[in-house]
Image (cartoon, grey):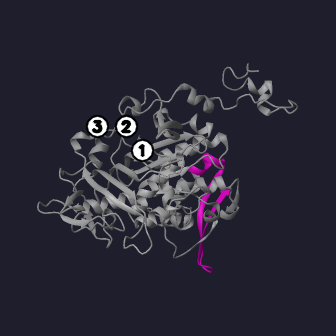
């Protein structure tokens, strides 16, 4: 669970310091930098599993194309920042498995990870592995006695006791100068002694990404946690595809494996009799929140072709996945994640309102909130340690989300070397926990007006074309004051 993120020097993120709860909604105009925040999270996740250059190339550029590595660094005019820094505070699982699927246990579950990446000119024929280098990497425990300085959102003691475990004061990874060379030191879990030094000069990847369970099972589980920070971009073409019997039973970030995942959940449901019935019934009930009269959801197993296909019976008529609307498929995929006890980690989702009728937006928000962990109950099979962050520019979403879960994304002007530039700033609503406990910048009332009163008068050159919103019989039904506007 990502509880706090500090980023500077990455795209248009300069001195960003944001705290996250179980569910967070970030609202802002197009191009303000909401997606760049998701990219920074995705970059950290990719670094836990890939080389520096591969992680950088996995981050989309404008137009969602593969990026040039240099473009990840903040730019003012034609000058790029020389470094980008990240600091992530996280809660990791107490138990998990290593790369060989052997069980490992964390020494402590509340950690802070620091990473400083620099850009260096890479001349042809040079022996260095690429233009990116690690200049600082640290992994430190956060004292459990200091939880109230770090976990600022409302939570109850049974939940905190279930996620905050272990005791450790010494660092797990640190960076130092040894013999005139910069090294990253690996400190063994639960053991005193001399740390292992890894020269940092030509590292092709982060030390955390290569952690092993013999030296530091805590670092392994920190890497597992970061690997679980995923950006879901649910594609209708992937959601509609039937799955082969051998397909992985875990939903892909593009929505692939939907039928196989739902089928796995149905087969794994404990109980007597037809164990699948309760799973399918819950799917149908949840889907009814979106599209009304849904009598049945099930997965058809075609033995002849070896395929699994999702079906939905609505108003008495069965529909295979290929004939369902985009919004219905997205909602169904998220409903599957809600029911999957094996789904943990962070779900980043852009524009959850896509394909959803405005009247059904509350149902979508209720579903996303249900996916996120409940901080009032201990974690377990019924309450996995999952987290949701969404971004939006929809008034319908902003008007329905809880005020403590909302962040307003805006541009703020800065000046450097006599050059002005704009960067992202995230503001919270007055009186919410991010402001009262975390000293977050405060969103003005004016920043919310474009969401709460989105239909503003528009000047027209000809004045010959009326708009639906300009009808007097409709304007008087909207927010107070709109009906009287001229």
Taking depth in this image into account, of 435 and 480 the one nearest to the observer is 435
Residue 25, position in %: x, y?
Answer: 51, 41
* Label 2 to label 1: alpha-carbon separation: 9 Å
* Label 1 to label 3: alpha-carbon separation: 17 Å
Q: Which residue is mark 3?
A: 149
The secondary structure type at the circle numbered 2 is: loop
Q: Nearer the viewer, mark 1 or mark 3?
A: 3
Quick check: can you spot residue 449? Answer: yes
Dots 2, 1 in contact, CB < 8 A:
yes
Question: The C terminus lies in which quarter of the figure?
Answer: top right
The secondary structure type at the circle numbered 3 is: helix
Q: Which residue is mark 2?
A: 153
Residue at image point 64% right, 60% down: 236
Residue 423, position in %: x, y?
Answer: 50, 41
| Apparent side of residue 357 relative to residue 90 in the rendered image (left or right) | right
Dots 2, 3 in contact, CB < 8 A:
no
Taking depth in this image into account, of 197 and 370 the one nearest to the observer is 197
Residue at image point 44% right, 47% down: 372
Quick check: can you spot residue 342? Answer: no
Q: Which residue is mark 1?
A: 22
* Label 2 to label 3: alpha-carbon separation: 10 Å
| Apparent side of residue 257 relative to residue 165 in the rendered image (left or right) | right
Residue 374, position in %: x, y?
Answer: 40, 44
- Determine the image quadrant of residue 176: bottom left
The residue furthest bottom is: 304
First to last magenta residue range: 286-313
């Amino acid at each position: 669970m990502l509880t706090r993120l500090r980023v500077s020097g990455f795209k248009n993120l300069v001195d960003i310091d944001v705290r996250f709860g179980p569910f967070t909604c970030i609202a802002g105009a197009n191009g303000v930098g909401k997606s760049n925040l998701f990219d920074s999270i995705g970059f950290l996740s990719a670094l836990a599993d890939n080389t520096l250059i591969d992680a950088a190339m996995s981050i989309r550029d404008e137009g969602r194309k593969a990026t040039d590595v240099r473009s990840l660094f903040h730019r003012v005019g034609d000058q790029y920042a020389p470094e980008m820094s990240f600091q992530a505070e996280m809660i990791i699982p107490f138990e998990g498995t290593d790369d060989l699927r052997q069980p490992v246990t964390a020494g402590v579950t509340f950690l802070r990870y620091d990473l400083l990446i620099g850009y260096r000119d890479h001349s042809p024929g040079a022996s260095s592995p690429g233009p990116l280098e690690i200049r600082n990497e640290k992994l430190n425990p956060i004292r459990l006695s200091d939880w109230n300085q770090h976990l600022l959102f409302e939570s109850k003691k049974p939940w905190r006791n279930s996620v905050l475990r272990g005791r450790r004061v010494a660092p797990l990874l640190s960076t130092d100068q040894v013999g005139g060379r910069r090294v990253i030191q690996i400190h063994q879990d639960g053991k005193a002694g001399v740390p292992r030094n890894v020269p940092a000069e030509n590292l092709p990847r982060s030390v955390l990404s290569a952690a092993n369970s013999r030296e530091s099972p805590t670092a392994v589980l920190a890497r597992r946690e970061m690997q679980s920070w995923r950006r879901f971009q649910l594609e209708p073409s992937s959601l509609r595809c039937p799955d082969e019997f051998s397909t992985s039973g875990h939903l892909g970030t593009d929505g692939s494996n939907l039928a196989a995942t739902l089928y796995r959940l149905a087969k794994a449901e404990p109980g007597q009799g037809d164990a699948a019935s309760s799973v399918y019934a819950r799917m149908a009930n949840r889907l009814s929140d979106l599209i009304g009269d849904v009598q049945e959801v099930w997965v058809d197993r075609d033995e002849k072709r070896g395929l699994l296909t999702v079906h939905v019976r609505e108003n008495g008529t069965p529909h295979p996945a290929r004939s369902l609307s985009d919004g219905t498929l997205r909602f169904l995929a998220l409903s599957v994640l809600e029911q999957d006890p094996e789904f943990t980690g962070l779900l980043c989702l852009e524009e959850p309102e896509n394909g959803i009728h405005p009247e059904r937006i509350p149902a979508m928000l209720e579903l996303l909130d249900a996916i996120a962990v409940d901080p009032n109950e201990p974690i377990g099979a019924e309450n996995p340690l999952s987290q949701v962050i969404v971004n939006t520019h929809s008034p319908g979403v902003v008007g329905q989300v809880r005020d403590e879960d909302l962040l307003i994304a805006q541009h703020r002007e800065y000046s450097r070397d006599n050059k002005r530039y704009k960067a992202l700033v995230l503001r919270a609503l007055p009186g919410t926990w991010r402001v009262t406990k975390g000293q977050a910048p405060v969103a003005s009332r004016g920043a919310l007006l474009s969401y709460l009163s989105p239909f503003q008068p528009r000047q027209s050159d000809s004045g010959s074309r009326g708009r639906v919103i300009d009808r007097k019989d409709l304007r008087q039904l909207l927010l107070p004051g709109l009906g009287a506007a001229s």
